[in-house]
Image (tube, grey):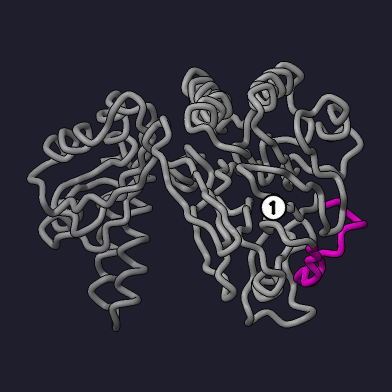
Amino acid sequence: MPRLLHLADLHLGWTPRGLPSDVAASVRRRRDALLGQAVELALAEGVDLVVIAGDLFESYDPESALVAEALRQLQRLTDAGVALVTVPGNHDELTYARSVYRRAAAGWPGVLVTRPDPGPVADLRLAGETVQVTSLAYVGGVTPALEPLRAFPRGGDGIALAVFHGTLVGPHVRPGDPFGGGRSLPLDQRALAAAGFAYVALGHLHVPQEVALPAGGLAVYPGCVGGKGPSDPGAADWTLVEIGRGGARVRRVRADVAPVWTRDVDVGGFDDADGLAAHVRGLGTAATWGRVRLVGALTFEIDPARLAERAGDAFLRLEVDDATTRIAPELLSRWAAQPTVRGEFVRRLRARLEAADDERERAVVTRALRYGLHALAGDA
């Protein structure tokens, strides 16, 4: 059976915003090294085909040095006899005159998809089987994408493979439903199933997903390997696939990426801020980009910014969010007794809290208390 490595959403060239320059540069270097890591895996695994289902680059006009390195890595695949199919995404869109895929088309290794409508792009002979590839590259104003695409032609008797950068939509979708503009490229799940694809290699969604199609095929998002931070943790694994006439089998292989996560920490399990800080420090490594959400009931004073500063040296990057839902009455009393701006604020909000009629109102007042206390830090 032909074996392939399914890549998508590598976003080479992405640099996170709002981080210290040295941390941002470290994250950028790790991301830009992902393609080389993927090529090494493909060669070590002896795959027959690599498909890139969009957003290889963060921008449609990436830096020349980055493009040159990407082309060098992709050329390693084709030089080794590995077939390659590359599809532009919405970040590195083909539409623009300066799109990397227009400027570098002549020297792009393998098959570069540029047709704006779904149709055949390659017939490949892999592992003794003919693999027929259907794809498109979204082109603004040309690609019919204001409604879910439903026309997916395929022909011949080989293994049918589709590669798209878009949003898989289900049977609930009605003609005319909005999709946030054509760049989301909605793909009708039922139509993909009816076309008889053994495997639909998708890109665009950063969380790994597998959707079984009724006819026995499989539609898969590999996810954004390495993620883009705690709000977009992406995937921790590479996606290897065996494809046959009856369907496909997926195998995940751990990628060498920095840990990215969000974790809840119940503050009720600690006696003071020192104990909490020590616990949070123990969660990190020098490569970890983590977000700690503080939950539970406050029994001692917590400053999220100060906690991130105290524990952050154990992380590549640490974010702390205060999502606690209650404040212990004795803590409120201690704050309210202070002859300060903070004390006056707590007295007024505590009165509102005691007068609250339901749990929802209490939650809103508690949230206001938390936000106000953080804003008044230093006015004690």
Q: Residue at x 77, y 48 (%)?
A: 123
Is residue 5 on the magenta stretch? no
Q: Residue at x 60, y 38 (%)?
A: 48
Question: As rendered, which of 234 and 46 lies closer to the eye?
Answer: 46
Q: Position of residue 315 (x, y in %)?
A: 32, 28
User: 10 Å neighbourhood of mark 1: few (<14), some, or many (≥20)?
Assistant: many
Question: As rendered, which of 157 and 224 lies closer to the eye?
Answer: 157
Horizontal side, residue 100 vs residue 216: left or right = right
Image vertical order of residue 260 relative to residue 24, above or below:
below
Question: As rendered, which of 324 and 291 lies closer to the eye?
Answer: 291
Horizontal side, residue 273 vs residue 306: left or right = left
Q: Amino acid at mark 1?
A: Val
Find the magenta span and give its range: 138-155
Image vertical order of residue 118 relative to residue 122, above or below:
below
Screen quadrant of the C terminus? top left
Magenta segment, prevailing SS (helix, strand or loop) = loop
Q: Position of residue 95 (x, y in %)?
A: 87, 45
Q: Residue at x 57, y 33 (%)?
A: 17
Q: Residue at x 71, y 66 (%)?
A: 187
Horizontal side, residue 121 vs residue 240: left or right = right
Pointer 1: what residue? Answer: 163
Horizontal side, residue 126 vs residue 136: left or right = left
| Secondary structure category for the residue under label 1 | strand
Q: Position of residue 370 (x, y in %)?
A: 32, 54
Q: Position of residue 131 (x, y in %)?
A: 69, 51
Image vertical order of residue 253 relative to residue 149, above or below:
above
